Amino acid sequence: MEAAALRWASELARQCPDAFIEASDSLAPEEPSASSHESCIFGADGTMIHVKFFKRTLGRTGATYDPRREMEAEYAMLKEYEKNGFSSGPYRIVKALGVNEALDCALATVYAGGPTLLSLIQDTLNGRVEEDRLMCALDLTAGLLKKIHTVMPQEDRVDAPEMFYSYLKPMLYLEEQGALDGFHRRISRGLMRWHGFRPLFEQRGVTVHGDANPSNFKIHKGVVYGFDVERSRTGRSPLLDVGTMVAELRHQCAYVAGDEDRARPYIDRFIAAYAPDRDEREKVMRMLPFYVSRAFLKIAMLGYWRPDYRMYLVERGTRCIEVSP
């Protein structure tokens, strides 16, 4: 299968030479992409191609998971990003090259070099990277998300039922796993207060990245590349992505450095880059706790945490939803 995938990648490289023009100075892989699926990097005719296999999942999937449908949906979304100008400039989404259902539902994209934002966060916390480098990376990532939320298709209002369903989904999963330990009552009371907060429902529905955790962004020579956009959807709040990033920064500082407060300057930098206008920033901060809470519960769903750290994540998510809007 790998030999067949290499032959396919080589053929794509010959068919799409223009796709690699701006990638030609970063041929050597610096860091593999994080993904929910098995993936490979192929060197083909002087190019680097990343191939993700949708039939080779690395985590749990729902009963309705269809690898062909997921493959085609992400390919179509990547093409939509390309159409809207995300192939050049400092804010980019990786370029799609093709799909191949016969090869375990493979999706090929141009390989993006450079470290992930996640590795920059962790290396900064461990003293291996200067903090200024992380701050610049946060500026770029905020700029990419803002461009996605501004340039890509929009709707008049957010999808309100989906907004609450996407919150309840991790909450119910954690309850089924016995991981809420009574916190579900506090979460439910907090949700009731947010359900009566009209500005939450009056947001414009934008296209979001949908999985804006730091492992899905790479930084290379002043350019940020986003990938793994299979959850990119329209009709969502832009704070879905912003809240995910804020929760991830707090989580990484707590988990790697043992000090969640270390995240404050990084969050401040990210928010200021995303919303430089003071009025806009105040609106973001007022609604942000709802989305940070959701993101903490989603992080807690991952199956490899120690019970005490998972409870910490649940507790942080609970405190966020209890913030009065």
Image: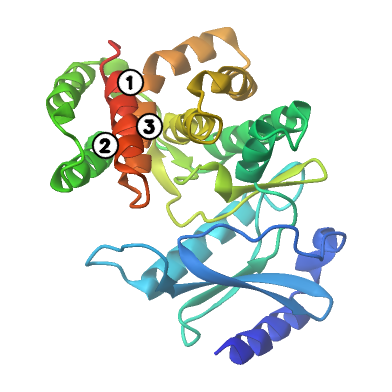
Residue 156's label in the rendered image is 3
Q: Quadrant of residue 135?
A: top right
Q: Quadrant of residue 32?
A: bottom right
Image location of residue 1, percent across then percent down: 54, 90
Q: Secondary structure at mark 3?
A: loop
Image location of residue 295, percent across then percent down: 38, 35
Of callouts 1 and 2, which one flags the residue occurring earlier in the amino acid sequence? 2
Which residue carries the number 2 mark? 167
Residue toward you, 108 or 268: 268
Image location of residue 115, percent across then percent down: 71, 49
Of callouts 3 and 2, which one flags the residue occurring earlier in the amino acid sequence? 3
Does residue 202 appear in this view?
Answer: no
Which residue carries the number 1 mark? 320
Kind of residue at badge 3: Asp
Residue at horizontal 34 percent and vertical 25 percent from the top? 316
Crowd class of label 1 (few under 14; some 14 to 19; many from 20; radius 10 Å): many
